[in-house]
Amino acid sequence: MTKQELLNKFYSNPSNITEVASELAKKLTQVEIEELTQSEKFQALPKVTIHIVLPVILQPYFPALLPLYKDLIEKLFVSQLQFKQALILDYLGSLLHFQPEKAGSYTAQIDALVHELKEKDASVKLVRAQTLQISYHLQTGNLQKAKALLMSTRAQKIRLPADIQKQLDFVSGSVMIFCGEYTAAAGYYSEGGFHAHVCISKILNGEWHQIDRIASQIQKKEDITTNEKDLVLKLYQLSLAFLEKKYLQNLQEITQEIKTVFKPTFEMEFALNKLIENEVQKTVLKILKPYRKIQLEQLSALTGLKVEMLQQLLTKLIVNGQLNYIIDGETNSLVKIVQEVKGSEGLLREAYELVEVLQSWV
């Protein structure tokens, strides 16, 4: 259908108006959509119709049209509170998806919306808003509040539509993965059918040997997207890196490939970064036991990581108090912070640490 034919059909208020609006949006330029939604004819449509089609028409040009979306909500739904709440919820969800860096500026708004809905006992709409609220606090790093909100939300005895339950399962798994509770994360992700996130949770939990079975099962299922299957296969490849003696370099290369090719979610990217940090910490602490000072070049050779990447990860571990060393910029080396232990006790401790490391390398 031509642009004009679609426009005529749209204004005839067909039963499939959502589909018509979606097709129309694909035909229009950003400027044409701005003109359409601000026209008297469009704004004279029944509010229930505008409430349905407005996000559909604007969405192809998000985030550019997010400011217009907000303005239209405020202008067109002054007295229709239910429609306004639903659209604000959709707007805040789109904002978090397209402009996550602005989450801190809108957290108060989602908090206020949830408070407003609680007073009205909005049930399913409330849970949808609470799920988004948890995501906002997770995005802004307020993990303690995100977890408290999650526990409160899941405690409610409300029968949820499948799509809302799926969103709640995803955000539940995400909170758990940020808390380091990887078994719980895998459980929630599994309930929601987020297979790649199940895999990364299990890898973080040291259960990398289970990924082979999960990957094999998923490849046989027809209701899973090709992108999800490919990502799971890549995570299976990631799990195989643990079988190699110097595996850190492969882990780093595969995680970087996942970030580049699959454009993972905020939660998946956090998990991949956490995996590298955890494994670097374990490997470096093991290597460093006999050393009071070691050149970064030498440590790079022992770990298989490039000096620049190693230095970034070491700096983060030092700042977080997970590594009792400092980086000496003049000598480009890692130097242990030690309290002097005099006499035979100090010698005995150093000898014990050296023997322990040598045994682990045999």
Image (cartoon, rainbow, N blue to C red):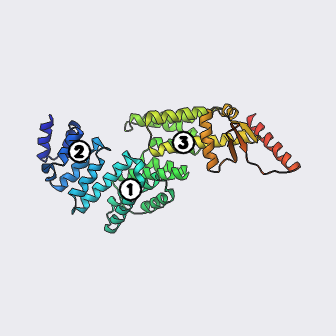
Where's the N terminus, which quadrant? top left
| Three-letter amino acid code at the position of disc 3 | Asn
Where's the C terminus, which quadrant? top right
User: What residue is disc 2 on?
Assistant: 57
User: What residue is disc 3 on?
Assistant: 273
Q: Earlier in the sequence, mark 1 or mark 3?
A: 1
Spatial distance from mark 2 to mark 3, Cα to Cα?
A: 37 Å
Position of 291 with respect to 222 (left or right) is: right
Residue nearest the viewer, comparing 290 with 15 = 290
Res. 106 mark: 1
Secondary structure state at the residue bearing disc 3: helix
| Three-letter amino acid code at the position of disc 1 | Tyr
Task: Tell me if label 1 and label 3 are in contact, CB under 8 Å.
Answer: no
Residue nearest the viewer, comparing 254 with 152 = 254
Spatial distance from mark 1 to mark 3, Cα to Cα?
A: 26 Å
Residue displayed at 25% across by 45% down: 58
Residue 146 in view in this figure: yes
- Looking at the rendered image, the disc whose residue lies closer to the viewer, 2 or 1, is 1
